[in-house]
Amino acid sequence: MDRELRGTGADRDPALDGLARIAAVGDLHVGPDSAGTIRPGLAHLATTADALLIAGDLTQHGTREEGQLLADELASLPVPIIAVLGNHDYHHGAEDLIRADLEEVGVIVLEAESTVFEVGALRIGVAGDKG
């Protein structure tokens, strides 16, 4: 399934035309001790990246509470966020709830899917599946 994602870069520096800055992180392993620690590390995204890719394991044990904590940390970030769940995110059978909570705050979660987003005049396609 292809999904369109909101564009980015309405206020981009024209010197960046033709370039896409992609930030990527994986194996976050978010747990109860992660509250308040993820978002500060992403504060620079508005000026350094056009999109954020997150590769699973997003959570430590795959609980909904861990997924909600991550969703809270990612809510309202200024760039499109595309994520793929990993094996840890399936440990408690809450993967559908984790996905729903992330998507509720605007994260695109891919599972054998793809999405396209725009960076200036560029169209960027991302495909993802569980790792």
Image (cartoon, rainbow, N blue to C red):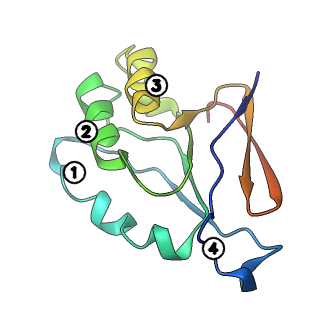
Mark 3 → mark 2, Cα distance in angstroms: 12 Å
* Disc 1 packing (10 Å; few <14; some 14–19; many ≥20): some
Mark 3 → mark 1, Cα distance in angstroms: 18 Å
* Disc 2 packing (10 Å; few <14; some 14–19; many ≥20): many
Which residue type does callout 3 highlight? Arg
User: Which-is-in-front pick, marks 2 and 1?
Assistant: 2
Q: Which mark is residue 4?
A: none
Residue 113 spot, x, y in % from top left: 73, 27
Side of 44 relative to 108 (left or right): left
Considering the numbered disc 4 on the image, is that residue within a helix, a strand or a loop?
A: loop
**Quadrant of the rendering where the C terminus is positioned:** top right
Considering the numbered disc 3 on the image, is that residue within a helix, a strand or a loop?
A: helix
> Residue at coordinates 63% horizontally, 31% vertically from top-left?
110
Location of residue 10 by image quarter: bottom right
Give the mark, 2 or 4, whose residue is nearer the N terminus.
4
Which residue type does callout 2 highlight? Leu
Q: Is residue 19 above or below residue 130?
A: below
Q: Which residue is mark 2?
A: 69
> Residue at coordinates 47% horizontally, 37% vertically from top-left?
106
Depth check: give the residue in front, 29 or 76.
Answer: 76
Q: Which residue is mark 4?
A: 12
* Residue at the bottom extreme, as displayed: 15
Give the mark, 4 or 3, whose residue is nearer the N terminus.
4
Residue 14 spot, x, y in % from top left: 72, 81
Q: Which mark is residue 34?
A: 1
Q: Which mark is residue 99?
A: 3
- Proximity of marks 2 and 1: CB atoms separated by less than 8 Å: yes
